[in-house]
Amino acid sequence: MRELASAPRPEAIRVLLARANDWVPQVRSAAATALAAHLRDDLVPAWALALDAVEALRRGGRVEGDAVVASIDSFLASPERLARVVAATRTAPMALRRIVGKMRRAAAPDEAALATLLHDDAAGRDIVAALSATRAAEALRNARWRDAVWLAAAVSPHAAVRRAGLASALGASGADRAAYIERFAFDPSAAVRACALAASSDAERARIRAAAARALDAPDAGRADDDRRRAIALHTLIALGGFDERATSRWLRAPGERTRAVAYAGCWQRADATGREALVLAALADDAPRVQRWAARAVQRDGLVPHWRSLLDVVVNAQSARRLHSVRRALGSASPWWRLAFELALGETTGGVDRARLASWCFDVDRSYAMPASADAAAIAAAWQRASSAIGDPLAGAVGSRLVRFGVIAD
């Protein structure tokens, strides 16, 4: 290390930073001396690319390390050197650019410069830097600059950043709460909308409800953004309690699939068990994959699975690979006997049973204690008698042995 101290070189910086946290005091001391010799202007680019190692030394927590890190921070904090650090890390990995961002904030000459940096970070695509900037804006004394950062967060591509901007604005004194709430009440993210609505007053809710009704009544030009706008407006009205089931159900026939999915969810909230089963079957029969996926998720959350014969009718009446996938997801919450009955009956309509599904059923039924209902057992026994010869061993033997064990067929 004495040689490195007398002849500094870029490639030595990382090694010396690691040794500055060595468990041997003499090694730490020699590394600190050598690092001090490397604090030269011609080595700034090398320091920039070793900032992650500087952060590792900072986290080391040794007293000697703190002194070394402080000297490095002081050296790199000058405007000229910091500009060179930024240039050297422009295409560096994201983690390194985040460290540089923190350095730039710490070196900001005044609050206006800091506010500009926070604004740029809040509007950027790096979610970590954007969240950090949104929270750091709370320390700005100038309310206009704080608002500028939070408004930049409002157009972030990340819902978490938008929500953080809203939460910060609502918690700050002097912020225009009404403007923020009414803006975020129609955010693309349901979580952000919920945050805005939860903080709204009765008067603000009335204005939001009126704005949502206008959005629903606006002419439909058939564009994707029209469907998105209507779906958000309908979701907001439902969340505000502004729609009863009859008013919501008319949107089950809306041209946009997003709007229909929201309408199904709204009707689902108010329906009883019979009504929910009918909604699931109607949604699975819908041609839109988004609506079919909603139905499968609703069954998984609620556990109320329509009868397998009803699900079979949905699949057979409008055959589609995506619809079948959603129906199988829904059946995943049902008894393994319903799943077997469905697969055997489906195989009769398509000309062959899905062998992978039968193998999966064997695995599931071995971990189940449920007995089939008599009607299901009779349907399975009849279907199995017709299908077993075409399936062949060893899979037919595996399924048949389990049917015998549970008394569905005779040995």
Image (cartoon, rainbow, N blue to C red):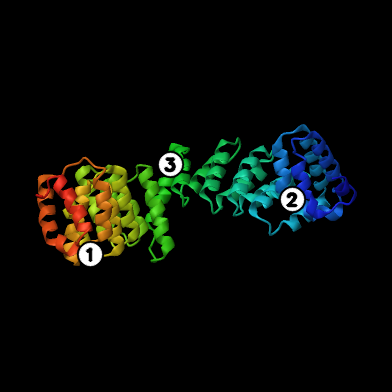
10 Å neighbourhood of mark 2: few (<14), some, or many (≥20)? some
Q: Hey, what amino acid is under mark 1?
A: Ala
- The first of marks 3 and 2 along the sequence is 2
Amino acid marked by disc 3: Arg
In space, the residues marked 3 and 2 are separated at their CA atoms by 52 Å
Residue 262's disc number: none
Of marks 2 and 1, which one's residue comes earlier in the chain? Answer: 2
Q: Residues within 10 Å of mark 1 (few under 14, many from 20)?
A: some
Task: Determine the secondary structure under disc 1.
Answer: loop
Question: Do the residues under discs 3 and 2 have CB atoms within 8 angstroms?
Answer: no
Report which residue position mark 2 lands on.
50
Secondary element at tag 2: loop
The residue identified by callout 1 is: 318
Q: Indicate the quadrant where residue 216 lies.
A: bottom left
**In the depicted structure, whether residue 74 falls above or below residue 343:** above
Q: What residue is shown at x 81% (from left), y 50% (from top)?
A: 79
Residue under numbered circle 3: 205
Quadrant for residue 254, please give it.
bottom left
**Residue 351 seen anywhere in this rendered image of the structure:** yes
The local crowd at label 3, few if under 14, some if 14 to 19, many if 20 or more residues have their Cα within 10 Å, is many
On the image, the x and y values in percent for residue 169 come to 57, 40
Q: Are marks 1 and 3 in contact (CB under 8 Å)?
A: no
Instruction: Give the SS element for disc 3.
Output: helix
Q: Is residue 64 above or below residue 270?
A: above
Position of 287 relative to 409 (above/below): below
Horizontal side of residue 84 vs 319, given as left or right? right
Q: Position of residue 40 (x, y in %)?
A: 86, 51
Q: How many tags in the picture?
A: 3
Q: Percent x, y for residue 347?
A: 19, 62
Does residue 63 appear to the left or right of 284 in the view shown?
Answer: right
